[in-house]
Amino acid sequence: MGNIVKMVIEANIDRFKAMLKTEIDPTKRAITARLLSEEEAKLTQMAQSEKRKPSGSLHCALVRTYSVGSTAQVAMSLSE
């Protein structure tokens, strides 16, 4: 799923850059520039997040203990 999101962000960046080359209305240019900046920030954040992931295909994101009746159970959230 992360690859799809990255591709969409990169496509948005390309589209906003192309729009800035031809747009002459100052208001539309400002909006497009802001959107471009936001998408570039998302891409940067995504790259930093990828660097922080442990090596290996699965890692434990959350371990929570809760009680059901008299039995304690542990729930794990695993992500790729």
Image: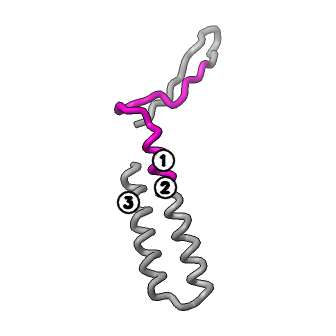
Dot 1 falls on a residue whose secondary structure is helix
The three-letter code of the residue at mark 2 reads Thr
Residue 44 higher or lower than 77, as above or below: below
Q: In this rendered view, identify the residue nearer to me: 65 or 47.
A: 47
The three-letter code of the residue at mark 3 reads Met
Residue 10, label in figure: none
Residue with the mark numbered 3: 7
User: Residue sitting at 45 percent across and 88 percent down?
Assistant: 22
Residue with the mark numbered 1: 48
User: Residue sitting at 42 percent across and 80 percent down?
Assistant: 18
How far apart are the two marked residues, 2 and 3, measured between alpha carbons? 13 Å
How far apart are the two marked residues, 1 and 2, measured between alpha carbons? 6 Å
Residue with the mark numbered 2: 44
Point out the residue furthest to the top here. Answer: 70
How far apart are the two marked residues, 3 and 1, measured between alpha carbons? 16 Å
Q: What stretch is highlighted in magenta?
A: 45-65
Mark with earlier residue (2, 3): 3
Asked if the residue at tag 2 contacts the one at tag 1, i.e. Cβ–Cβ closer than 8 Å, the answer is yes
